[in-house]
Image (tube, rainbow, N blue to C red):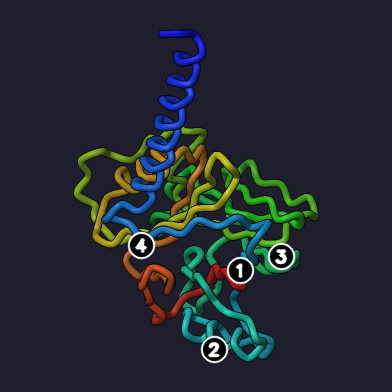
Amino acid sequence: MTKKVAVIFLIIISSISVGFYVQSKKSKIDHDRFISYVVNPKKRNVEFYWKNEKGENFKNAENLKFWLKKQKRELVFATNGGMYKKDNSPQGLYIENKIKKIEIDTAKGNGNFYLKPNGVFYITIDKTPNICLTNDFVDNGKIKYATQSGPMLVINGKIHSAFKENSTNLNIRNGVGILPNNEIIFAMSKKEINFYEFAQYFKNLGCKNALYLDGFVSRTYLPEKNWIQTDGDFGVIIGVTK
């Protein structure tokens, strides 16, 4: 085999390997157990919603979709964006359009939200997404949107230490992670799973940090994948429009 032929052969093999890697990643994202949505916040509008201009809670994707339509905006994705109290107010930190509407919660307590460490998913004014531990969050005046939830699923590339691989604590779950290319991935399980399996899904996609948003009440609106759940009675809703 000549050097020229060998080089061409290596290029072909490399191309096949790269293609296989990309397809493998795509297969993981499209796994039968999850409905997922990847978005670049610098190319699409990713916004957090709680109340309309009349002070009424949006509550679900159907109400949000109708409200946006009146503004000639199309809702292409929506999911409930964190836990909430009985009055539908966000549990923990909530920032919308640079306005802090709920203070950060660093207290101790029971339930998933307080399974420390919990964390904050936020987007800066230059549309950079991030997920950090609650104790690491700094409001530097450059945060456009933020929602606090818990527990963290993946922390610096490692699955939350409290999760057990064979746990029988099964539930529908939705969460958010930051991919290596700095795009956001939202995911919801189609069937009941435990925390470890859910965290492993984000970890396998290369997310260094991922955050649990909510459990059995979770809903996802994603018509491009024929997944249309518009009901619910939530606090924060995360929506993507075009």
Residue 223, disc: none
Q: Eyeballing the image, is 54 above or below 83?
A: below
Residue under circle 2?
A: 66
Q: Is disc 4 placed on a helix, strand or loop?
A: loop
Residue at left offset 72%, top offset 61%: 144
Q: Amino acid at mark 1?
A: Phe
Real-space CA distance between mark 1 and mark 3, rounded to the nearest whole angstrom: 12 Å
Q: Looking at the image, is mark 4 or mark 3 nearer the viewer?
A: 4
Which of the image's four quarters has the C terminus? Answer: bottom right
Q: Looking at the image, is mark 2 or mark 3 nearer the viewer?
A: 2
Residue under circle 1?
A: 48
Residue 110 rendering spot, x and y as whole percentages: 40, 55
Which of the image's four quarters has the N terminus? Answer: top left
Which is more toward the observer, 109 or 113?
113
Q: Mark 1 vs mark 3: which is more N-terminal?
A: 1
Residue under circle 4?
A: 215
Q: Looking at the image, is mark 1 or mark 4 nearer the viewer?
A: 1
